[in-house]
Amino acid sequence: MSSDVTYDISVKTGDKKHAGTDANIHICLHCDDGNKTDKYNLDKFFRNDFERGQKDSFSVKSIYLARVDYIELWRDTAGILDDWFVDVIEIVCHKQTFIFPFFRWIKPNYHYRIRHLDTSLPEDDPFKEQRRTGLKEAREQYQLTVNIPGFPAQVKSLPEDENFSFDYVWDITKRKTHAILKSKIAKLTSGSWKDLDDLQNIYTKEVLVLPESVAYWKNDEYFGYQRICKMNNTLIELCTAIPKKLAVTDEMVKPSLEGLTLAKAIQAKRLFMVDYEIMDGLPCGVAEHVICAPIALFFVNGKQKLMPIAIQLFQTPGKNNPVFLPTDPEYTWITAKLWFNHADSTYHQSFTHLGGTHVTMEGTAVITHRNLSPSHPVFKLLAPHFLYLLAINTRALGNLIAPGGWADRALSVGIKGMFEVIRRKTQQWRLDVDGTLPKDLEHRGLLGENVLPGYYFRDDALQIYNAIFNYVVKYLKLYYGSPEKLMNDNELQDWAAEMVLPKDKGGLGLLGVPGNGKITTIDQLATILTSNIYMCSVAHAAANFPQYDQYAFPPAYPASMRGKPPKDKTPLSESSVLASLPEKQTTLDMMIVTYILSERSTNCLGNFEVQYVYDPQALAIVDEFRNELKAISQQIKEKNKTRDPPYPWLDPEEIPNSISI
């Protein structure tokens, strides 16, 4: 074999701030048999190499290597800007392709050694010291802290690596201004609405379009549908007994039960309940605001529709806290539903969306960077689902969820009440129940399509959850052929230990983690990883993307209410409903922000923005996952042709990989 062969080298610089470099870049190719090429300076005359997001190609001639098993890469400090972040280096020689995933900042004068495909467990990595050094640096950048008392642990300060590639896209304030101008909305002055026509006249054909909810908000069937197929779908439960605190009787609900008693409706599994005990005594941002802690019963009627049959607005029954019924005066019943939805929207914004996906998953992203090397197969599995998560959380908590910010203006409870909901639920939240969809459904008595027909969220989410779980199990089995492999993986065990370590000792303090900080089986690890991926993709999509349709029309789903909830069955009017709704400027603020939050800004599930996986066997499993998602997508599209109304939110083509908005 000739000693003079050509190696075609392509280098992809990362798309991060300051990722490009003016430094001199050097490379040497190695084979495990001990042979290596000369050292080369990668440079092209008259070309500005290694710019941010750029791919550069070079050809070098050197001795023949049977394989390029690893490369040695380093840089100096030449030039004004010498920092450099490398994504991937690819080398082609004699029709063989060797891929070296870096995804690292290259320190000056440090010789990095990266193997072909760069996927290994810690004990199998030949460059252990380099790996330990990388993790030590990561732990300095990614530190946990409890920023808000009682909250899940979050990142102490945002690492530079986690910033958005293009900041202007994520500037909520600028996007609000742009949306207002683009919508051509007439300026809304302060004050209340004259009538419902006045409220409906603010919508446009371009941006702030008329929401679907405008046509159905008074409808009981639509109110039931909101519980199972809008944004807050994980609270309804099968009613197995009427709680003593709910002062409902058979006589009250007789007109709604189609000849059944409450006991028989329970026995037939046709009675369901939502109980907002967690909202009891919740503080509000403004003293005169009120938030209810309602309990409601729902009945599946003969048409297989979920219908509300009773609403009690507070937890303790009494003369001033009656059970409202569909047989009450029209606007009295509508008003009770409004106050129920007001509580529901408060919980949705506080925990279902913010606390349960954004904030809870932030801590998991941090400990993943702290404990798992970029070479670790589990890091490669999780990383696409943490894209931009820390950045959007920093923006949201710094702008929308800040004193005097959007949440304080648009929600009755303000951030004071939001934070209290998150604190309360965080104390209860368990990964093996709340974060594991099949167990959550089982806990609520809703595992099975025969229970609660029309629960499209469950049907679609469970199908995708199972696809994720199967994908994760297949992937893990490539690298963990025995329990010993799991137990000897010190990075993985450190990761699991930090997940359950109490927050006051520097951990996440999560409850219900399989193995309780010591992973011994594939099933334990797969359950944890599936929960992480599901929460960052499916759960967030379900909670986030239907927002505009609901919040943009306050009578359908009010985030803010004025006045006091009804204390008796006195007949009310349309004008009393309008008087309880937020004023015009608050309504516009809610419309604009939920319009922005409802936009999709990253790739769909399985179509990763950054490809971390290059191992051919693992790539085959990723392709299987993508194909299964395509099949599920087609099935959901077919189902939606006959669903009334359709449920598009969990079509895999509509679910982003990560929480990036």
Image (cartoon, rainbow, N blue to C red):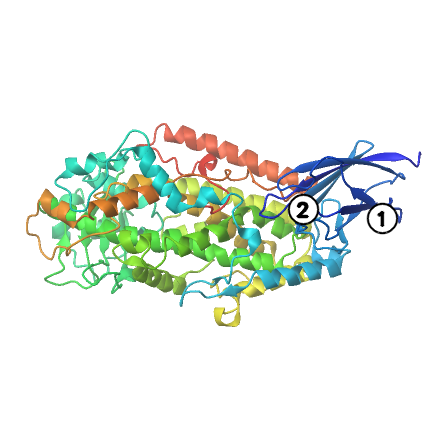
Label 2, secondary structure: give it: loop
Horizontal and vertical percent position of residue 528: 53, 55
Q: Earlier in the sequence, mark 2 or mark 1?
A: 2
Residue in the image at 60% along x and 36% along y = 623
Farthest residue to the left: give it.
570
**Position of 160 relative to 420 (above/below):** above
**Can residue 132 be seen by looking at this rendering?**
yes
Residue in the image at 18% along x and 40% along y = 218
Horizontal and vertical percent position of residue 429: 41, 60
**Position of 320 relative to 35 (above/below):** below
Q: Which residue is mark 2?
A: 21
**Position of 403 relative to 254 (above/below):** below
C-alpha span from label 2 to label 1: 30 Å
In which quadrant is the C terminus drawn?
A: top left
Label drawn at residue 32: 1
Q: Looking at numbered disc 2 in the image, what kind of residue is underneath it? A: Thr
Label 1, secondary structure: give it: loop
Q: Is residue 84 left or right of residue 256?
A: right
**Position of 381 relative to 604 (above/below):** below
Horizontal and vertical percent position of residue 318: 13, 63
Residue in the image at 36% along x and 58% along y = 402
- Which residue occupies the foreground of this view, 411 or 32? 411
Occupied quadrant, residue 126: bottom right
- Which residue occupies the foreground of this view, 171 or 2? 171
Q: Looking at numbered disc 1 in the image, what kind of residue is underneath it? A: Asp
Residues marked 2 and 1 touching at CB (< 8 Å):
no
Residue neighbourhood size for the residue with mark 1, other residues' Cα within 10 Å, grouped as few (<14), some (14–19), many (≥20): few
Residue in the image at 89% along x and 46% along y = 35
